[in-house]
Image (cartoon, coloured by chain):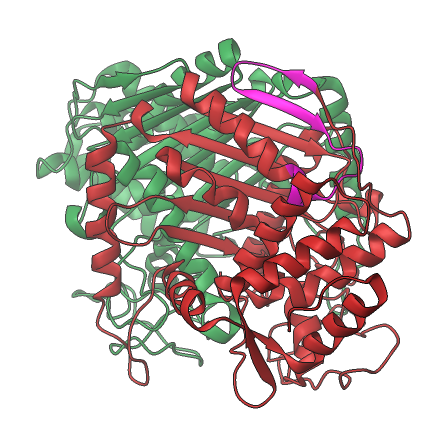
Chain colours: A green, B red
Amino acid sequence: MLERFELQGKDTVRITERNLREMVVSIFEKSGVPQEDCQLAGDVLVTADLRGVTSHGVSNLLRGYMEMYKYGLVNPKPLWRILRESPTTASIDCDEGLGIIIAPKAMEIAIEKARRVGIGMVTVMNGRHLGMASYHAMLALKNNMIGMCMTSTTPYMVPTFGAEARLGTNPIAVAVPADKEPPFVYDAATTVIANGKQILARRLGIKLLPGWVADANGTPIMEEVVPPPAGMDGIFPYIDRLLPLGSTREMGSHKGYGLAGVVEVFSSILTGGGYSVKNGENNCNHCVIAYNIESFMDTTEFKRTMDEWLGMLKSTKPAPGHDRVLYPGQLEAEHEVECKVKGIPLHREVIEWFRNTCDDLHVPCKI
Amino acid sequence: MLERFELQGKDTVRITERNLREMVVSIFEKSGVPQEDCQLAGDVLVTADLRGVTSHGVSNLLRGYMEMYKYGLVNPKPLWRILRESPTTASIDCDEGLGIIIAPKAMEIAIEKARRVGIGMVTVMNGRHLGMASYHAMLALKNNMIGMCMTSTTPYMVPTFGAEARLGTNPIAVAVPADKEPPFVYDAATTVIANGKQILARRLGIKLLPGWVADANGTPIMEEVVPPPAGMDGIFPYIDRLLPLGSTREMGSHKGYGLAGVVEVFSSILTGGGYSVKNGENNCNHCVIAYNIESFMDTTEFKRTMDEWLGMLKSTKPAPGHDRVLYPGQLEAEHEVECKVKGIPLHREVIEWFRNTCDDLHVPCKI
């Protein structure tokens, strides 16, 4: 959750959800992706922007995806198939298709299984980038289910006491329906910061704070670091040295590191698709799970209790210097309401990219 | 994992596993717990000590359990029953029975369901303290399954930006079998430190480090704090002000806080048993899950890949000042091998308690 930067002021322009969606879909189509899949991809990316999860929205991800299609690193027309199946499980070979397109389909299979037997879980091997993990988890919500999604990513995490990156940023997303309150939506990398945040920090010239990255020897950097300025080429020096949640052993980095391991087991090793270090860049395997609430208890009572519990969390007395206590997904829901009305803010550098790209691809530019 | 202190030197004496087990079982029997359940309780506690998880072993937990039985806060002969059941799920009312005794039984139900349909998940409401969560998760290992266990505990965690405790320390345990390597066993509170660690720190006079606790207003304390000396009575001032994993917002405490929320949803709200703040002290609800590896992929290949992956993690080049990189469960497995030979170290203050308690209860003292 909250892998966000406030995008506002003179460097941003707002675009309507509809216009952004149309541009994204058109750009995907130019990569040879089937029309229906383009709509799905557009929905995943634009939903991230609507929810303020800029690190996983169009600005950070779309251009990378286009490059991957261009260089054949991702399959625009994957022939994905189920390798093994049980009443509760399915194991999918993704055929190098983009996760943002295949994970929602995997989640629909999981939901259907959960509807029949209580729980459905689908693993996805041989995959590519997942986008915002909570998108896929949230598909469970309208079915009165709890959704979960995990993905194993390129190895950027340095284990506790280690000097080399050995695990991905490996996020976990969990979406839980409530009644009147916006849903509880947890979505967090198991590193202190998501990799996208570094990329965004670089673009916006924002400092990396203490406890975010390790130095070249693996020692946690516990002071502020200024990243290279936006537009500078070359390898970002901290890109493969992200610290696990907890930052240092004393503050629990072994817990963040171990949790990344859990994610790697479920979303990579258990898919039959190996593990991050072996698979290298671009390969991302996934796991989605749906839990049918009615199999455990009365759904109405569950959602009523969720409202009560979320209300309790929101009403927590704030610490000095803070206005309020939030629950996961609350700010994102508020952001979505605002953006549906005011439009989605994009940084001028991203707008520039859209204009150039639309021009290159002969796609109508909507901004 | 690793909620441990090294117990060694002049303040400790080693006791054989067998002798410790016999004493613990005899003490449980004196509380009116049926013989078979006493054996189970003894196994959970002694396994924690064998694995070096002192915070969840006999020294920290046994005397508390005995007090709870004495004051009627836990039911020695619970009539637990299944309230709702599906092919993959069961919802248990625990009848105020101790979690260390009922969770293993719940896990056996989950394992049986996973054997039949791929996944089994059992929620447990109206429960009491769970002990070491990984004990229950590890029951899956010998069945070639991945085990998971979560529990919602007394509210000691201050949410990000909050001034009041609103969630439990809410640990997650995940046990994953390998072939030749000791299993991957993750077991961690979603707070920076487990509550038991505070109790142990107090007994041993160890300082609380930066980022572990908040002050009375909820502001994270980012310097060392000396806890009150061992033996001092009264309320421990930081006991209900534990910080979420991540310590501060800048270092990702919202991720630890949110994760505690996820655990509370699965192991409390979804059980039908409410939530921590509502339930108050002593009430702990649980959730156990078993995933049958063979439903996803070939078990032999999975375990072989686990060996390879764990070997890769262990072989990570260490950062300056460190000898080696560990994986979750590795140190605990090594500790167990050592303790099986040398005996289990107990602090002299704990030995004193055993001698007095055995004397009071007319139970043979084995140390």
User: Which residue is depicted at the point 55% across and 42% down?
Assistant: B149
Q: Nearer the viewer, residue B192 or A308?
A: B192
Above or below for A97 versus A13? above
Report the side of A294 relative to B339 (left or right). Answer: right
Above or below for B146 versus B167? above
Tell me where residue B245 appears, x and y as whole percent. Answer: 56, 61
Residue A360 appears anywhere in the view = yes
User: Which residue is depicted at the point 72% across and 60% down?
Assistant: B62
Q: Which residue appears farthest toward the top when viewing the image?
A: A116
Q: Quadrant of residue B261?
A: top right
Q: Quadrant of residue B317?
A: bottom left
User: How many numbered marks have been drawn onto this rendered protein structure?
Assistant: 0
Above or below for A35 versus B41? above
Q: Nearer the viewer, residue B103 or A10?
A: B103
Q: Which residue appears farthest toward the bottom when viewing the image?
A: B10
Q: Nearer the viewer, residue B213 or B145?
A: B145
In the rendered structure, does residue B86 fall within the stretch colored magenta?
Answer: yes
Tell me where residue B166 appears, x and y as whole percent. Answer: 76, 53
Above or below for B197 versus A293? below
Tell me where residue B324 appears, x and y as whole percent. Answer: 28, 74
Q: Which residues are magenta?
A: B83-102
Q: Which residue appears farthest toward the right when viewing the image?
A: B71
User: Which residue is depicted at the point 15% across and 22% down?
Assistant: A32
Residue A346 appears anywhere in the view = no
Report the side of A113 relative to A310 (left or right). Answer: left
In the rendered structure, does residue B15 fall within the stretch colored magenta?
Answer: no
- Of the 4 image quadrants, the one containing the C terminus of chain A is top left
Tell me where residue B237 appears, x and y as whole percent. Answer: 81, 75
